[in-house]
Each structure stands twice: as structure tokens, then as C-alpha cells.
């Protein structure tokens, strides 16, 4: 193989092709056209004297050569990228870097979208690749930041607490229980939605608290996201225990009640791979994100009073 014919951009395309196992998705990931990626694949096949990707009934699969070189290629590019980034000053105003984030619909809605909008004002050339956390947890090795509750965190990552959240009860504004001081009996008699992002469930942390008091509630619907639950509450007589921050943001559309018992809250944390700890761009990104979330938290607390 003639290494003089290879360059970092070409090897980055190779990494995308082998990880995505498709020309179109690899082109989208790298940010070039599909014909351009096809041309790069042709160059790579010639360079390695191997097809690298071959078609089958389900799409494209890696050849044995491609399977062998992928982990070494990934590690090599990551090390080279890290070396370069740690030694080149980061200028947010002129950077065209892409930062990848994995989080939940609740956290995106509650804090991240507004924070990212502010970051875009400071750094108009940067891009954000945002994905949802679900049953298949995002790997910290693949993301710049994973923003979620500690249950999603990897012990091998570095973490920072962004804010702490508590719960309230929400319902539509015409509900008989709206804005009333509910008793525990009232709460348990209501028909509840339980948000269970990972898999359908009718039991959650609130039910554990109730069980410790010898009580149960009526959970009649399980939904995968807080956004769906918010829509359902506005058009039915169902209620939902909701993160207070997200509820306050929707206070013009729903009624918000205090829970008639002490309930556990939760922390939202940002985690990242140790290899990014000294990366100047990543330091700016996570620091400014934390500052913006903190500022937003202060505004929310002020609005609640």
C-alpha cells in the first residue's frame, strides 16, 4: 500500500464508511456528497487492494480486511485528532467544528435547546449532532457529551452535574383537581401517565415511594417520552408526575400541583470520555454549556417564586 497516496481526510472517510457500512450514510456523516464519497471509496479500494465493503441481501458488509483494520484505524485517527486538537488554540468565533450530544427529549426541551442556541450565537460556524438516548445507550467513546441522569453514565467517564430536578403533578387546566391542595387519597385515585423512556412500564420511582407508605396509584398509560405525556395531559383527564422545570416551561397550557408527599428528585449530569479532558474546544463547549444551564436554572427558580 502506497501511504503517500493517503491523507487524513481520506482515512476519515474510510472510518465513516466502515462504521456506517454504507456510502450515503457515511457521506452524510462526513458532510460531503454521495458521489464524492463513492469516489473516495473507489480510491480506498485501490489503495488497500480490497473491496472493503461488499453488498448482500441486507445492504453492505465489511470484508475481512476491513474488519481487521477498523479498530486500528479508529484508534489511530482518534489519537492523531487528539494530538492536533490539544495543541491548536480553539477560537469559538471562527471554529467550524461539530460537537455530538446524546440526551433525552426532556433534557433537550428543558435546557439544551436554549443553551445550544446561545452557543450558536457565540460560535456561528459550529454544528451540533444531536441524538436521543434510548434502549441502546450512546457510547461516551462516540459522543462529545452525554447529558442525562446518572443511570446512563459510564463509570469510566468524567462527569459534571448540570442541575438538580424535582417533580410536580400536571393536568389540563379544566381538570377538577387543578390548582387544588391534593390529599394523598386524591393523588392515588387519579388516573396517571407514567413516562418510561427505556421500555413500557407501569411502575416507577414515585410508585416505590408510595409503596413505602403502603399506598399505590392508578397508572393507566405508559409513554416513552415526556413530550407525548404533555400532549396527552392537555387533551385527556389523565395526570402525570413531571419534572418541574419542564412543567414550568409549559405553565400556560397546563395546571401544576404540588405533590402531597416528599418525592425523590434527580440530577442531570454531562459526561465525556477522558481523552477529551484537555481538548481546548471541548473545554470551551462543556464549560459554556454548564454556565448557560446554570443561568437558565436561576431564571427558572426566579420564575417559580
Image (cartoon, rainbow, N blue to C red):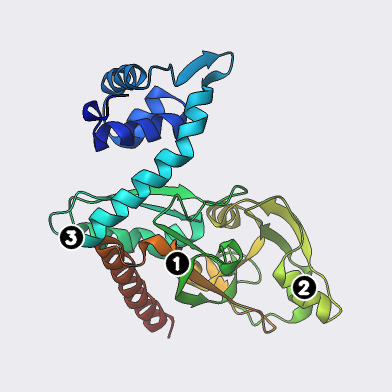
* Mark 2 neighbour density, 10 Å: few (under 14) some (14–19) many (20 or more): some
Q: Residue at x 82, y 82 (%)?
A: 213
Give the percent coordinates (x, y) of residue 284: 26, 67
Mark 2–mark 3 distance (CA, rounded to whole Å): 46 Å
Left or right, 128 with reference to 216: left
Taking depth in this image into account, of 102 and 172 the one nearest to the observer is 102
Left or right, 244 with reference to 116: right
Sooner in the amino-acid sequence: mark 2 or mark 1: 2
Callout 2: SS: helix
Residue furthest out toward the front: 1
Q: Residue at x 51, y 32 (%)?
A: 68
Give the percent coordinates (x, y) of residue 211: 82, 75
Mark 3–mark 1 distance (CA, rounded to whole Å): 20 Å
Taking depth in this image into account, of 19 and 241 the one nearest to the observer is 19
Q: Which mark is residue 270?
A: 1
Give the percent coordinates (x, y) of residue 249: 43, 67
Looking at the image, how many numbered discs can be counted on the residues? 3
Mark 2–mark 1 distance (CA, rounded to whole Å): 26 Å
- Quadrant of the image containing the N terminus: top left
Considering only vertical position in the picture, is 16 above or below 250? above
Q: Which mark is residue 92?
A: 3
Taking depth in this image into account, of 181 and 169 the one nearest to the observer is 169
- Quadrant of the image containing the C terminus: bottom left
Left or right, 17 with reference to 197: left
Q: Closer to us: mark 2 or mark 3?
A: 3
User: Picture quarter containing residue 74?
Assistant: top left
Q: Residue at x 59, y 13 (%)?
A: 57
Q: Residue at x 39, y 56 (%)?
A: 144
Amino acid at each position: 500500500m502506497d501511504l503517500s497516496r493517503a491523507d487524513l481526510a481520506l482515512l476519515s472517510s474510510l472510518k465513516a464508511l466502515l462504521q456506517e457500512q454504507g456510502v450515503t450514510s457515511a457521506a452524510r456523516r462526513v458532510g460531503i456528497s454521495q458521489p464524492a464519497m463513492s469516489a473516495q471509496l473507489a480510491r480506498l479500494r485501490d489503495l488497500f487492494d480490497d473491496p472493503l465493503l461488499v453488498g448482500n441481501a441486507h445492504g453492505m458488509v465489511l470484508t475481512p480486511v476491513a474488519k481487521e483494520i477498523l479498530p486500528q484505524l479508529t484508534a489511530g485517527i482518534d489519537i492523531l485528532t487528539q494530538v492536533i486538537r490539544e495543541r491548536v488554540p480553539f477560537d469559538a468565533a471562527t471554529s467550524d467544528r461539530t460537537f455530538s450530544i446524546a440526551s433525552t427529549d426532556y433534557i433537550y426541551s428543558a435546557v439544551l435547546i436554549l443553551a445550544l442556541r446561545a452557543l450558536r450565537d457565540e460560535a456561528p460556524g459550529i454544528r451540533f449532532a444531536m441524538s436521543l438516548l434510548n434502549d441502546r445507550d450512546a457510547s461516551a467513546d462516540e459522543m462529545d457529551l452525554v447529558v442525562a441522569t446518572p443511570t446512563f453514565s459510564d463509570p469510566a467517564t468524567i462527569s459534571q452535574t448540570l442541575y438538580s430536578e424535582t417533580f410536580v403533578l400536571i393536568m389540563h387546566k379544566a381538570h377538577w383537581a387543578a390548582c387544588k391542595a391534593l390529599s394523598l387519597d386524591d393523588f392515588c385515585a387519579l388516573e396517571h401517565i407514567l413516562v418510561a423512556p427505556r421500555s413500557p412500564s407501569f411502575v416507577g420511582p414515585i410508585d416505590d415511594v408510595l409503596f413505602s407508605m403502603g399506598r399505590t396509584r392508578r397508572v393507566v398509560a405508559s409513554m416513552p417520552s415526556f413530550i407525548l405525556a404533555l400532549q396527552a395531559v392537555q387533551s385527556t383527564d389523565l395526570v402525570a408526575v413531571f419534572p418541574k422545570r419542564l412543567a414550568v416551561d409549559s405553565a400556560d397550557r397546563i395546571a401544576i400541583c404540588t405533590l402531597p408527599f416528599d418525592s425523590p428528585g434527580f440530577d442531570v449530569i454531562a459526561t465525556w470520555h477522558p481523552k477529551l479532558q484537555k481538548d481546548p474546544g471541548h473545554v470551551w463547549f462543556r464549560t459554556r454549556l454548564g454556565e448557560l444551564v446554570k443561568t437558565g436554572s436561576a431564571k427558572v427558580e426566579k420564575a417559580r417564586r
